[in-house]
Amino acid sequence: LGAPPGALQSPDMAKGLYEERLERDLGSVRKRVRRMGKAVVIAVQNATRAVLAHDTELATDTILGDLPINRQARDLDHRCHVFIARHLPSAGHLRFISSALRLSKTLERIGDYAETIARAAVHLSVPPPESVVRDIEMLGKHAADILERSLAAYDKSSVVDARETQVRVRQYGSTFDKVFQHLVTAGNDKQHPIEDLFSLEAICNRLERILHQGKNICEQTIFAITGERKGDKTFDILFVDDTGTGPSLLAASFCRRAYSDAGTFQCAGWAKVEEPDPSFVTFAGEKDLDLDAEVPLLSADVKNNVADFDIVIDLSGGAREHIRKVPFHTTLLRWPLEHPSEPDAVHRQLVHKLGDLMDILLGEDDE
């Protein structure tokens, strides 16, 4: 007797059925990313509205709404792991599932941020100051917009849209420093309870974090499509001392050669810019460094643009006397030198300190 019709499948037919199931499972993951992303965007928008309108009912709804988001994250994780076990993906499919797993964590974290904003809104005893209201409105609008754009780029698998959204995020880099200053001003006015100011700071901080999570989503989009990984973080570092004619010049020049991939390195002194110290120039020449080519920043430029630097390294110990307020995202390190007029001693101290700092900033080489 012959086999019943359909009992045997040709290789092409079996391959077609497998590909159909693969695409169906991929579509299921995409659908859940889309649904979770939409829920998170709504949560951010509602949390912001709750703060601006002083609406405790909307805030409470947003807090409770984080529970379904958490369940969606668990469901998405489960489906991604099932996909891996079922299809043993490679190349593009593996990158997509890997990005979806990371995106699940990112969206869950953003949902937690929205919940924190809503909880802070509930505890506000009075409406926020007008300047802070404008800040929250602005940050909330930007956060929701970036989130929607980054998720749309992921859904469309668009590298172009992802990169454009990353550029938009960078445009808001210094925004939080201004917002923080408005909060300080509101505190100095003493017209708002200190508890409210802490809640407002938490709200603004979480909105800023949502902006940065949008950038992370874009990075996952680019990785899923191209395999391109997030580049190592670089740092803008400034060395300052009393005169700007010796130690800071040597430090900046040394770092440009030894740690060229770590970022940018500049130098400055608090006194009027003078010619480089001859003893430092001679010593640097023996180390194949050219201090005559160094151009220190003017002290006025430093004072007015400290926020442009991730790290300011104070080699004389007097930076606090010249910088009225260190910006929120700038780290000031005090490295007063024991023998600042002796090039060899300065070099020995800085080589070790900079080596330790770069291990922290960049990580040790595993090779």
Image (cartoon, rainbow, N blue to C red):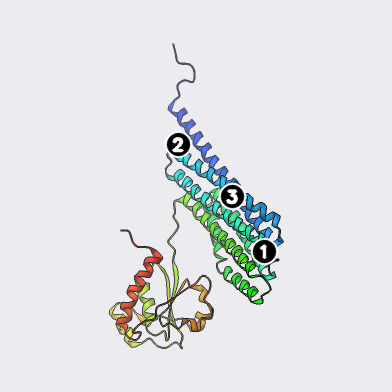
Whichever of callouts 3 and 1 sits on the residue coming sooner in the sequence is: 3
Is 227 located above or below residue 22 in the figure? below
Q: Is mark 2 on a helix, strand or loop?
A: helix
Which tag is nearer the camera, tag 1 or tag 2? 1
Residue beneath disc 3: 37
Q: Where is residue 262 in the image (x, y as percent from the top left)?
A: 40, 67
Q: Distance between the residues labelled 3 and 2?
A: 25 Å
Query: Looking at the rendering, in which quadrant would you find the N terminus?
Result: top left
Residue 86 numbered tag: 2
Q: Quadrant of residue 138?
A: bottom right
Task: Mark yes or no: residue 164 visible.
Answer: no
Q: Nearer the viewer, residue 306 or 202?
A: 202
Residue type at mark 1 is: Leu
- The earlier-in-sequence mark between 1 and 2 is 2
Return the residue at label 1.
124
Going by the numbered disc 2, the residue's amino acid type is: Arg
- Depth order, front residue of 281/124: 124
Q: Do the residues labelled 3 and 1 touch (CB within 8 Å)?
A: no
Question: What's the residue at 57%, 52% (across, down)?
Answer: 151
Residue 24 at what x, y percent from top left? 53, 36
Check disc 3: other Cα within 10 Å, few if <14, some if 14-19, many if 20+: many
- C-alpha gap between disc 3 and disc 1: 28 Å
Q: Residues within 10 Å of mark 2 (few under 14, many from 20)?
A: few
Q: Kindly indicate the quadrant of the structure image that contains residue 178.
A: bottom right
Q: Circle 1 — which element?
A: loop
Instruction: Quarter of the image for the C terminus: give it.
Output: bottom left
The 10 Å Cα crowd at callout 1, few under 14, some 14 to 19, many 20 or more, is many
**90 is higher (above) or lower (below) than 240:** above
For numbered disc 3, what is the local secondary structure?
Answer: helix
Given the current orientation, which residue lies at the most extreme top position?
Answer: 1
Apparent side of residue 280 relative to residue 124 in the rendered image (left or right): left
